[in-house]
Amino acid sequence: MAVTESAPATAPTRPPAPGAGPAAAEGPPTGPAPAGPAASTRRGYGTAAGGGYEAILRRQTQRESAARTYARSLPIVPVRARGLTIEGADGRRYLDCLSGAGTLALGHNHPVVLEAIRKVLDSGAPLHVLDLATPVKDAFTSELFATLPPELAADARIQFCGPAGTDAVEAALKLVRTATGRRGLFAFTGAYHGMTAGALAVSGGADDVRVTRLPYPQSYRCPYGVGGERGAELSARWTETLLDDPKSGVTIPAGMIVEAVQGEGGVLPAPDAWLRRMRSITARHSVPLVVDEVQTGVGRTGAFWAVEHSGVVPDVMVLSKAIGGSLPLAVIVYRSGLDAWEPGAHAGTFRGNQLAMAAGTATLAYVRENRLAERAATLGARMLGRLQGLQAAHPCVGDVRGRGLMIGVELVDPEAAGPDAAVPPAAPALARAVRQECLARGLIVELGGRHSAVVRLLPPLTLTDEQATAVLDRFADALAAAERAHVPRPPAPHRPAPGPSH
């Protein structure tokens, strides 16, 4: 169905890194929608099934399962995309701050990604090879290892998994259980690790599972009601107590799995000192530390890997999303001492996705060579600053947080806060309204957090200064519009009808 723009026949191997100048900006992000399905067909958007984009949306509703997610809140039919911009079949253009849920580190159809894919296609190389060695795989592994924390890279093994991050989580859990001979796991409140059984079991929304749940530190809604360094210290102390107390009822687990920044949990960065404490606790008890970098990796948080902010070197890293350069790819990288698997202990038919490896190699190299992680740190801090300015002007903005270009804005209902509440309750209806107002203004965002009240911004790392300004302008306008519609105005003061003059 999708139609993509043709890249230049002589796309440069390494185009200039994005900057602040006009040359780095893309074309206009929005445009008038053509009138009716016929216009869509004239633009090349017609389908063999017939009808325009409205018919495509109707067929999707009729044919696809009730489990569909993004399609419910984003009723668009993308047909072209480049960088930050998606063009829908209705002719409208959107600034995409969802980026495939963090998958598109370089945005849509970046020239180096297209060139890498085209090179494999033109070479006649096999596209499906199970787990056989190929030059494409060797290049990907070499580039990936060059980006890892040196201590891990020097003593690492890699397992290619099924093409989704959730399968890599399953592999990581299976690995530590095999290596330690233990079964239990430590995971955290608010976590999200995927949708398969094992990944769900260590996610925050799980039920009826045998996983010890630990409090994830956060300042705004601190589980201990104190926030800051003190809240993180209490969280770490509780973890330590469970392991040190012989009567805690908790046995030494096979592993601890944690996100350095909780994404779906509401964009909650783990405090660096707390993460170092988790590393110290797990090392002392010989518990493998598994860090889920599926959404945070490849420069997203302002470092190539989010663990680098704290200096922590985990025993296992779970990687997916951006490492495939927009195509499905998932791996785990782990210390060689854990490699106790038997042949075939974790397998999958699509472990050898050659196109994804080629696209991933190009993406990893481009991010590294052009220092896009540093760029994400600088631009992300600037965007956070402006959003914090909105927080000061809008009482419905409870908290602004994030790291690099992984940003969250938590919306609250200040009028509903009880006298004993530390912070106002979440406002999911308002968040949905903001998302809708953003879409109406040509800006794609998504929601997360405990009550889906956190508006999440995940723009590509190639975001220019001009584009960042456009994103924030549209968000600010959408926030004001949603606030006007959802926050009741105080009643006008009663004025008695004028009487007879005296």
Image (tube, rainbow, N blue to C red):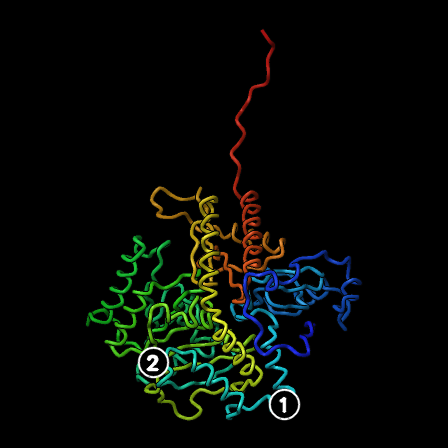
- For this rendering, which residue is in front, 499 or 296? 296
Does residue 237 appear left or right of residue 213 in this picture? left
Name the quarter where the N terminus is drawn. Answer: bottom right
Q: Position of residue 339 (x, y in %)?
A: 36, 88
Residue type beneath disc 1? Ser
The reply to whether residue 321 is in sight is no
In this rendering, does residue 122 appear at all? yes
Quarter of the figure with the C terminus:
top right
Q: Residue at x 26, y 60 (%)?
A: 234
* Disc 1: which residue: 123
What label does residue 151 carry, if any? 2
Outermost residue to the top = 502
Residue drawn at point x = 46 percent, y = 46 percent: 413
Q: CA distance from mark 2 to mark 1?
A: 36 Å
Whether tag 2 and tag 1 are in contact, CB under 8 A, the answer is no
Name the quadrant containing residue 21. Answer: bottom right
Residue 138 as seen in the image, left or right of residue 207: right
Tell me the SS state at disc 1.
helix
Q: Residue at x 30, y 69 (%)?
A: 276
